[in-house]
Image (spheres, rainbow, N blue to C red):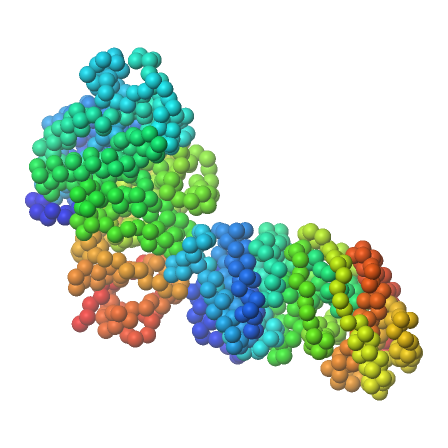
Amino acid sequence: MALPQDPLWYKNAIIYQVHVRTFFDSSGDGIGDFRGLTQKLDYLQELGITALWLMPFFPSPLRDDGYDIADYRSVHPSYGTVDDFKKFLTSAHERGIRVVIEMVLNHTSDQHAWFQESRSSKDNPRRDWYVWSETDTRYRGARIIFLDTEMSNWAWDPISKSYYWHRFFNHQPDLNYDNAAVREEMWDIMKSWLEMGVDGFRLDAVPYLVEREGTSCENLPETHVIIKELRRKLDEQFPGRLLLAEANQWPADLRQYFGEGDEFHMAFHFPIMPRMFMGLKLEDRKPIIDILQQTPEIPEVCQWCLFLRNHDELTLEMVTDVERDYMYDVYARDKPMRLNMGIRRRLAPLLENDRRRIELMNGMLLSLPGTPIIYYGDEIGMGDNVFLGDRNGVRTPMQWDGGWNAGFSTADPESLYSPLILNPLYGYPAVNVQSQRRSEHSILAWMKRIIGVRKSTQVFGRGSIEFLHPANHRVLAYVRQLKSETALVVNNLSSSAQAVELDLKRYEGNILIEMFGKNIFPRVGKLPYLLTLGPYQFFWFRLRKI
Amino acid sequence: MLEACLAERSVLNDDFLRQLISVGEVDLLVGLPTFNNAKTLGPVVQAIRAGLLKHFPRERAVIINVDGGSRDSTPELVKAASITDLQLSSEVYTLRTLHSISTISGHGAATGPALHTIMAAAELLRAQACAVISPESINIDPAWLERLFRPVYRDHFDFVTPTYRRHKFDGLLLRNLLYPIMRALYAKRIREPYPSDFAFSGRFCNHFLEQDTFDHDESGSGTEISLVILAIAGSFRICQSFLGTKARAHRDSAELVPAMRHSVGPLFSSLDTNFPIWSANDGAQPVPTFGPESELTAESVRVNRKQLHQMFTSGVAELEPVLKSILSPQTLLEIQNIAKVVEDDFRYSHELWVKTVYEFAASYHKSVISRDHIIQAMAPLYRGKMYNFLVENRDASGEDVEANVEALCRTFERLKPSLLERWDGRK
């Protein structure tokens, strides 16, 4: 299958996020690898996803799950070789699946050769590749992100006897983007992967690239200059490839990262995710509409990325104190579930394994404006282990079957990179791909179905959105429109059945066709359109004037 | 029960029902009965909204206005308090939608039908706690919501009556009649048995709706005091909660008879059905109270006492034939005697006042004449007692007034046997 030649492919993509380490171990060493991932591409094709986002797979001491890169040009030996990667890439493309890889621009591991050189001497040519200071008092306006572990954004280096700047863990020194050599080198690295055929990059922690005194050191104009330069080179040399921004910011601040369509193609919409969970628990659409109304328009060629869960904690940075307290109380009562300013849990446990809520949340994920990202394992309702450190509880091995090591690896269980989920509710004997493949009514089967429906139209990926405002606040309803195609989405956020009257006057005369069963609903007339919805039920309708 | 009631004669019109469907299940419901209150309503609605958002940000809440058919913009003022995704407020932050809805009862100023509608809505919405706020409570602050709701929502009380900080000459009907007689007969020391701001539980609401008597009360009068009596008679958990300063009421003397119809009338009526309860009570029990039971202020105010005295004396003279049919000869004679006394020497003793009231109650029970005429006839005598109270307490401190009220209460309690004697016809 050839990749479709659509420069805006990302707008209709269904992205699947996976870490090579977690997916499938082909070598029997207890760690997932590229050969294993390649073997499982048929599964992903069957699921219906159209793009993969791979978490960092570069050589790394793995003190931050690979986000501490020690060599940007190679593959971590545990995951295979560059050749393995190339074969994987070719196989994915053959199945119509694009591959987006991680690029951590902001910082390296302190084990990276650049940093080792930089710290070795103040006269070293790479000294200025990092941000050094004789004091720890500069850039006081910058907040500390990892509050649970870091006391300062400066760390003392006993070798060079000075402080280095780090916005994340102290073993992740920030690169100095005021240095042209750094910028050149990073582009050269990106270029080498693009030449191999990768379809895009998720650029990690982009708001923090540049530091300036008297500022928050986030979202600075100088950062945008750097992004624009990267984008210009990308478009010139590799048209059709993608830049995806990871910037945990409010929508208004994020808007800058799209520029005039000359910075990022896509950016994660972080604040909507906690509000979807909040809206569901409150049984009230207000938090969702509030944040979407605060979301600015973006250039036509750009797109938001939506997700329910990912490899990090469910971040609560972009909520108010009242909202954060509420989210902790309703989704993370037990302390081990909380980390930094968020909740380290997977989708199914967050939703108490309630199939209806899992479907509703995925229904919204796939019908709100943006490109959806599905986190590996969530398509089968995998659980988590909040007793593993850091965010490792949501990064456990993929559960393929109910046999040895969940079908993930032939290694001894003790040698797996992470313990498997074993509890009776979410453990691999109960939740696995093989058993769900056998049932037409499993979550996996349902996910395939909804992805298929989403892909049957471009309206969800590219259409405009207009919220309806029925008096019943438990119902979230919106109309998506792309040229002559119109879809109506109605979500019941409540645990009880609801009646709702929709003002569809504009669509008078249209027939509603339910998009899953293709059944016809009554024609829209002059009166409000009355619908009844069961608990957590949702409808996707195509509106047709026949 | 409710379904049957609605089927026969619904208090919920279709438009209101549609609004209720949109509101859905709630934790807290604030009822706001109104009639031409636009001039004072704005701050009241704002305080209610602020109170809900501040003290109960996570709870599902609704403000329900039942309007008597205002010709000003009263319902619009209430509806404007909504916070939805269409009516986002830049000044306030809310976690969830707050509905503020309105319906017309068409019963004018009568609060009974409005309360009935509010309670029917509360049952449909499965409200755990409901508060009713008077649109005239212009001194309301957001904390009132917390003080009314918390005893029900958190402490599982079923009925919350208010206590206030009042001027010593405010609430005279309460202090000279309603509180003492309720205390003597129903054995509960409820300071505001005729409340305009109060709260109740969903459980109590369901009980109310099961009472046929309220279904047939077309006049809609006196529901507030009837609710208190219903709570007592049903052995519901009652408490009092101090709200704050009650704004001084500026009542016209012509409003006395309607006020007595709405309070004394239902109270006397309740004695018929609740005879087994009040006749067996022995000794008033204190009611759990959050905050002070009563606070009286004593700043000097101008009161037209002379008019009260005149109305008393003329009433006693003009209504003599009526009073003869209600009062015992001895009591009537004593009243006629004090009516002859000059203003400065006038004294309507507690003992005589209590006898008067009990004899009116017994005559009301026996319907010796039209019950409404009995209530009307009581008004001039009450004015005499009021005159006496104002004179006696002209220079009194709040504590002195309290002591005076306490003495009156004890007199009501001491003479309760005389009412029982009259009730069963021995006198």
Residue B362 visible, this angle: no
Q: Return the residue found at the far bottom.
A: B321
Above or below A492: residue B368: below
Above or below A294: residue A401: above
Q: Residue at x 35, y 28 (%)?
A: A139
Residue A135 visible, this angle: yes
Q: Position of residue B249 (x, y in %)?
A: 68, 67
Above or below A142: residue B160: below
> Quarter-wise, where is residue B226 in the image?
bottom right
Above or below A366: residue B248: below
Tell me how many marks there are.
0
Q: Residue A301 or B314: which is nearer the viewer?
A: B314
Q: Residue at x 44, y 68 (%)?
A: B19
Q: Position of residue B51 (x, y in %)?
A: 54, 55
Residue A144 appears left or right of A96: right
Q: Residue at x 18, y 28 (%)?
A: A183
Q: Residue at x 76, y 61 (%)?
A: B300
Q: Position of residue A465 (x, y in %)?
A: 26, 58
Residue A79 appears left or right of B316: left
Q: Position of residue B385 (x, y in %)?
A: 82, 71
Residue B3 appears left or right of B382: left
Q: Residue B400 or B63: which is nearer the viewer?
A: B400
Q: Quarter of the image containing the C terminus of chain B?
A: bottom right
Q: Quarter of the image containing the N terminus of chain B?
A: bottom right
